[in-house]
Image: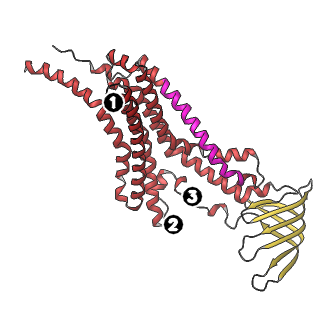
């Protein structure tokens, strides 16, 4: 009578020593690779904000606080890719060192050998889901708010004497000195907020005040010089007291958050008083994208497992399978982006987003594990046949 391997051993909930050994390597490698790649992307992307911070005379702390809010979005993008790389690398190394061969000779089935990789994929998928649904929208919203304050408000509070400070994209302020009581002396303001009516404002002294959370400067004993765009004449207006708003023409309450800042509930039920019908479809796509893309981590990990464990070991196959796995990842990623683009034009194609993210993982699981279950059923059918 043929011997049947017990199924409960293969599906045991407790992790064995081998499971913990492989899982520890996977998680450490995943943490190291994701952290290193996220740091590299953060360094390259933060260079775009150097001119914004330095040009307005802000400190290094403000620069770090601003750019660090983008890190969760970087991690959410690269985590599925690093999951594939880690699973592929660790299992490929186990196969090269013949550790998988020893495990198989000890009676471990493909599912039992792949269980640490499946656990790693589950953890990565859960992290991606938490990032996409909760952490990334909150951090990106804080980033946009902080950036808006820097461009329109914060630089006005950090005006330095003897320095031309660009408080916004179309306003520059210069003061000769700042007294101990906060009085500004020798003030010059270049105001280009109104196209065709650019003005230069000079004042002997002034004070910086806050009105409705907006920075204003009250000027005393000055003049406003403006060139008429039609006649080319210089118009000079003297004043004893004048107040200038140092923020942009649009206050912070008029900035509409984009789709990346909204929560899932806000994306699925947008306020149509603020957004157009065209934006509504984009919000639906963004909501489904956040819910579906985390499962790319599972599919990518399954592709890595098939690339490392599929077929018999040989030197030629050990090189060919990883290359095919990488090409499969590129193809799945390109297909996912293509489907998202098509779904933004036709909402009836949104289910394809789930097929592109979950489909490759299901197919790889079928290829890797179904032959094992078929092999288990054959002895059972042979044993049950004579008794019948």
In-front residue for pair 245/60: 60
* Mark 1 → mark 2, Cα distance in angstroms: 54 Å
Q: Secondary structure at mark 1?
A: loop
Between tags 1 and 2, which lies in front? 1
According to the image, label 1 marks what residue? Answer: 310
Q: Residues within 10 Å of mark 3 (few under 14, many from 20)?
A: few
Query: Disc 3 designates what residue?
Result: 257
Instruction: Please state if 36 lies on the left or on the right of 265 as rendered.
Output: right
Q: Which mark is residue 273?
A: 2
* Rendered location of residue 320, percent (x, y): 38, 34
Label 2's element? loop
- Is residue 211 in sight in this rendering? no
Instruction: Please provide the residue range marked out in magenta.
Output: 24-51
Where does the image place residue 101, in percent across and percent down from the top left? 36, 19
Q: Is residue 174 above or below residue 300?
A: below
Rounded to the nearest whole Å, what is the CA distance between mark 3 and mark 1? 47 Å
């Amino acid at each position: 009578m043929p011997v049947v391997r017990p199924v409960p051993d293969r599906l045991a909930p407790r992790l064995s020593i081998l499971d913990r050994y492989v899982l520890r390597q996977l998680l450490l490698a995943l943490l190291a690779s994701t952290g290193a790649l996220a740091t590299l992307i953060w360094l390259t992307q933060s260079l775009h904000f150097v001119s914004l911070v330095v040009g307005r005379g802000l400190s290094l702390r403000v620069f770090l606080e601003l750019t660090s809010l983008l890190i969760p979005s970087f991690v959410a993008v690269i985590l599925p890719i690093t999951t594939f790389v880690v699973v592929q690398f660790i299992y490929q190394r186990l196969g090269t060192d013949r550790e998988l061969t020893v495990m198989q000779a000890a009676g471990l089935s493909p599912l039992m050998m792949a269980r640490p990789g499946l656990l790693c994929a589950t953890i990565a998928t859960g992290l991606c889901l938490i990032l996409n649904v909760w952490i990334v929208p909150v951090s990106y919203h804080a980033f946009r708010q902080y950036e808006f304050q820097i461009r329109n408000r914060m630089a006005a509070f950090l005006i330095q004497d003897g320095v031309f400070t660009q408080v916004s994209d179309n306003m520059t302020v210069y003061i000769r000195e700042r007294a101990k009581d906060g009085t500004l002396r020798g003030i010059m303001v270049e105001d280009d907020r109104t196209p065709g009516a650019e003005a230069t404002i000079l004042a002997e002294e002034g004070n910086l005040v806050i009105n409705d959370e907006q920075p204003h400067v009250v000027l005393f004993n000055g003049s406003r010089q403006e060139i008429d765009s039609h006649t080319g004449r210089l118009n000079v207006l003297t004043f004893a007291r004048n107040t200038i708003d140092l923020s942009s023409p649009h206050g912070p309450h008029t900035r509409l958050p984009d789709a990346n800042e909204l929560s899932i509930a806000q994306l699925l039920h947008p306020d149509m008083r603020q957004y157009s019908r065209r934006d509504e479809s984009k919000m639906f796509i963004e909501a489904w994208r956040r819910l579906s893309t985390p499962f790319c981590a599972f599919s990518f990990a399954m592709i890595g497992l098939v690339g490392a464990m599929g077929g018999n070991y040989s030197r030629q196959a050990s090189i060919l399978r990883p290359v095919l796995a990488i090409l499969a990842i590129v193809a799945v990623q390109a297909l996912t982006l293509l489907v998202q683009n098509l779904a933004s034009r036709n909402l009836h194609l949104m289910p394809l987003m789930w097929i592109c993210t979950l489909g490759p993982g299901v197919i790889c699981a079928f290829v890797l594990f179904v032959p094992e279950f078929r092999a288990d059923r054959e002895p059972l059918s042979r044993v049950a046949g004579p008794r019948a």
